């Protein structure tokens, strides 16, 4: 018999706060990042040229991340979202949100716009993050390949390429690890 059992989970590094930002949603309404307080958010870009040429592996993000979020959508405290900025392929905002939404609806029979949110906005400013003297944006448009994991307090917790299946799998694991961190904190507080 054991007297007590304590799990020691790895925690993700905190790279600091993501600067507050605003965006326009699919309905043309101006929104702000403060609406994500209390949510875990995966920030990506999607090009209007997807499916032909995407900077991220959309199919793998669907299979490894979106489907898990969708299946757990009714669990309390497990509010996880994907926020994808629609760009023209050069990193600039575009008005073609409805075209990209049609692609997502085609690809995902269970597409939920409250879980996978399409946005128009200045993605470059969100990705313009510096940590330990290094910047995410170094050579223009390559930032569009990156996935950012934002915690419930809008801190950056992980940055990975969305261009590699292994990195998408690791991002899914990081999201689960971050949720465990919150579950552990909630268990201590109860």
Image: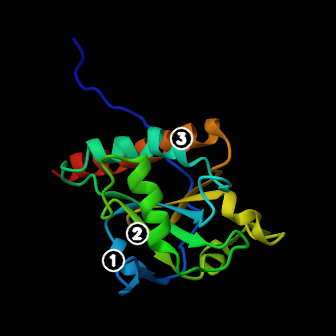
Q: Quadrant of residue 92?
A: bottom right
Circles 2 and 3 in contact, beta carbons < 8 Å: no
Marks 3 and 1, how far apart in space?
A: 27 Å
Q: Secondary structure at mark 2?
A: loop
Reading the image, the residue beneath label 1 is 35
Q: Between marks 1 and 2, how big is the CA–CA gap?
A: 11 Å
Query: In the rendering, at what x and y percent does residue 150 appear?
Result: 48, 63
Residue placed most toward the observer, 95 or 82: 95
Camera-nearest label, 1 or 2: 1
Residue at mark 3: 60
Q: Is residue 101 visible?
A: yes
In this image, 154 relative to 16: left or right? left
Question: Looking at the rendered structure, which numbered label has been put on residue 185?
Answer: none
Please identify, in this view, whether the residue under mark 3 or under mark 1 is nearer the observer. 3
Please determine whether, in this image, residue 16 is positioned above or below residue 122: above
Q: Nearer the viewer, residue 50 or 22?
A: 50
Q: Residues within 10 Å of mark 3 (few under 14, many from 20)?
A: some
Residue occupying the point 27% across, 41% down: 71
The image shows residue 25 at horizontal and vertical percentages of 40, 79
Q: Which residue is mark 2?
A: 153
Q: Residue at x 24, y 26 (%)?
A: 4
Q: Is residue 11 above or below residue 95?
A: above
Instruction: State the separation of the CA atoms marked 2 and 3.
Output: 27 Å
Q: Name the residue located 37 percent from the left edge and 42 percent from the top edge.
A: 67
- In the rendered image, the quadrant that contains the N terminus is top left
Q: Are marks 1 and 2 in contact (CB under 8 Å)?
A: no
Q: Secondary structure at mark 3?
A: helix
| 126 vs 3: above or below | below
Task: Say left or right for 22 vs 188.
Answer: right
Q: Sequence order check: which comes first, mark 2 or mark 3?
A: 3
Q: Nearer the viewer, residue 153 or 121?
A: 121
């Amino acid at each position: 018999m054991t007297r007590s059992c304590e799990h020691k989970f790895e925690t993700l590094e905190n790279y600091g706060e993501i600067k507050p930002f605003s965006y326009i949603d699919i309905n043309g309404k101006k929104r702000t990042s403060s609406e994500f307080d209390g949510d875990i958010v995966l920030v990506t870009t999607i090009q209007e040229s997807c499916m032909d040429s995407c900077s991220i592996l959309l199919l793998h993000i669907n299979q490894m991340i979106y489907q898990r979020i969708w299946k757990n959508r009714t669990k309390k405290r497990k509010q996880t979202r994907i926020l994808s900025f629609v760009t023209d392929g050069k990193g600039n905002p575009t008005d073609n949100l409805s075209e990209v939404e049609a692609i997502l609806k085609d690809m995902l029979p269970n597409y939920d716009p409250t879980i996978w949110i399409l946005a128009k906005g200045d993605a470059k400013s969100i990705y313009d993050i510096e940590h330990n003297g290094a910047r995410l944006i170094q050579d223009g448009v390559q930032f569009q390949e990156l996935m950012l994991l934002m915690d419930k307090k809008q801190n950056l917790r992980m940055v990975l390429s969305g261009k590699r299946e292994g990195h998408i799998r690791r991002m899914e694991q990081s999201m689960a690890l971050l949720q465990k961190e919150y579950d552990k904190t909630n268990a201590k507080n109860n």
